[in-house]
Image (cartoon, grey):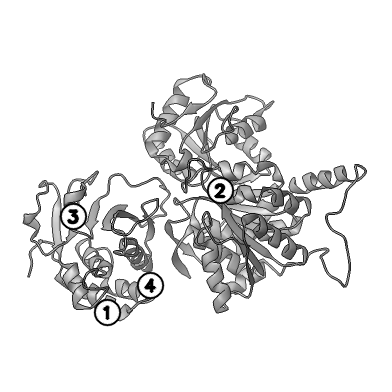
Amino acid sequence: MKKVIMGNHALSYGAMLSRAQVIAAYPITPQTQVVELLSEMCADGTLNAKFIKVESEHSAMAACLGASLAGARTFTATSAQGLALMHEMLHWASGGRMPVVMGNINRAMAPGWSIWTDQNDSLSERDTGWIQFYCSSNQEVLDTVIQAFKVSEKLMIPSMVILDAFSLSHTYEVVEIPEQEKVDAFLPPFQPPYRLTPEDPHAFGGLTSPDHYMEFRYKLQKDIEKVPALVEETGREYEKMFGRYLGQVDDYLCEDAELVFVTSGTAGSTARVVVDELRNKGIKAGNLRIRLFRPFPFEKVRSILSRIPKVAVLDRNVSYGHHGIFYQEVKSAMYGQPSPAAIFGFIAGLGGRDITKDDYKEIANYALKKDKPEEEIVWIGVKK
Amino acid sequence: MIEIRFHGRGGQGTVVASKILADALAKEGNYVQAYPEFGVERRGAPVFAFIRIDSQPIYDKSRIYNPDHVVVVDPTLVEAIDVTDGLKEGGYIIINSDKRPEEFKFPDKYRVITINATEIAVKHKLGTLAAPIVNTAIVGAVVKIMNLTKLESLVEAIREGVPLRPEDNIKAAIEAYEKARKDGRHE
């Protein structure tokens, strides 16, 4: 069934179709309509789930962890300062191997107060051990939630499904809502290998001495390294059933490109239009939109960028005192590779400033004109 | 691709108008992207809503700066702001107004259409006399003038998407659809 829905509701439908059993959320700004619709679904019986209203995002994630540990499929959603307040609990989720799936609306961090998009909220949680997917359409949001549960539960690692504020969260698009029976066939009920139950008592989260701690972390790293291959496999399985494929990246016309944009989120969708326009003018451009950010898809990025003369990374975020974060990651991935590309780093669109097609043309002009980057960061659209 | 910008005031249902139009278009297999002004809405303040329509998937997620057409839900906005900002040559300006198109002073490169959506909404008792809800009527006129969808698709979209008194809203949309005229003349 096709429906015109906003990105917030694409998350809700994804959680509904995945048959989330427990949803915990703090229902005040920076929360969005994601959990509003889910609470209605719980109230009218569309979704057979326990909706737990809590007093903060920290508690929301804590409630999710308890539910997940008890063996429930668990979902929540947040944004910006709300995600930051969860920070401590995010480590508990990954370290405790609780496969919660969470929607995060990319909103800029205050101050100044903002409800507009940029990526610094989710990228500040880069090292918490969560899988991170960045989406560029409402269809992708819905499909990613379902696939994220599958990936997360297989490896017992939590996932964040991330979408831009307004550009997706409040934007209506046509979305194919899959049939429940087909989703059930794709995503069977959550069967944790161990859970919190009086019938089979275990202790969770106890004191872990230096004799053991490192092995837990080693195992987390080894398991999260399995994600790229699992995302591909899960994506192919999903494609067979639903006809839509989502992988680690979305690469467009990169094979023969002289210039490739490396992008994410909705800006990575607009980039595709710019690629077409540049190609019409005889400039061989391509677009590599990164979907899976954690774990970083090293192999995929290397295989696509290794022969590309010019790479222009667009960041809607900044690591203060360093570079744009995707720029850091791409440079790190390409270090030591044969015939390295010239990699340029651009920052645009902070705090919801629009990233326009003209911005991309400015980026292309800059990268094509210069042999190598002459500035650490090239800022696009900053008022002088 | 067609891009349309709606101008209204907070509380008039301008965003809902764009959503109803999106629903009707999607029913006929179109790709649509509809979004409100990105921000915080306040009752009575000027608000915007935007819609992109295409037969192909829409990848452009940047804002609309040069709409093909504009729709003015609240006629007082014509004096308050420049509703033609960025409007493409030959674009329609559809205004909810009891005036004739020629009474508005717009450059000749635009096609001005007026439709008295307020009168239609009041007749069908949509909203209150002081604050009639004109969105379904205005969309009826938009669909007709721009030849966007069949009337049946719009009727179906309203029936499914308008929770409060859908049948009266459908009547308003049909009346506006029938009254709206491309040559701009009033009957």
Q: Is residue B36 above or below residue B186?
A: above
Q: CA distance from mark 4 to mark 1?
A: 13 Å
Residue B130, percent from left and from top: 22, 69
Q: CA distance from mark 3 to mark 1?
A: 26 Å
**In the image: residue A82, left or right of residue B9:** right
Q: Which residue is mark 1?
A: B168
Q: Which residue is mark 4?
A: B161
Q: CA distance from mark 3 to mark 4?
A: 26 Å
Q: Are marks 4 and 1 on the same chain?
A: yes
Residue B93, which numbered label? 3
Residue A380, percent from left and from top: 44, 31
Q: Residues within 10 Å of mark 3 (few under 14, many from 20)?
A: many
Say which quarter of the image contains residue A200.
bottom right
Q: Residues within 10 Å of mark 2 (few under 14, many from 20)?
A: many
Res. A33 in view: yes
Q: Give whichever of discs 3 and 1 has the lower sequence position.
A: 3
> Helix or strand or loop: what does disc 1 sit on?
helix
Q: Mark 1 belongs to which subunit?
A: B
> Helix or strand or loop: what does disc 3 sit on?
strand
Q: Nearer the viewer, residue A263 or A348?
A: A348
Q: Mark 4 belongs to which subunit?
A: B
The answer to the question of whether label 3 and label 2 lie on touching residues, with beta carbons closer than 8 A, is no
Res. A238 in view: no
Q: Are marks 3 and 4 on the same chain?
A: yes
Q: Nearer the viewer, residue A293 or A80?
A: A80
Q: Are marks 3 and 2 on the same chain?
A: no
Q: CA distance from mark 3 to mark 2?
A: 39 Å
**In the image: residue B161, left or right of residue A337:** left
**In the image: residue A189, left or right of residue A260:** right
The answer to the question of whether label 3 and label 1 lie on touching residues, with beta carbons closer than 8 A, is no
Q: Which residue is mark 2?
A: A80
Residue A6, percent from left and from top: 46, 60
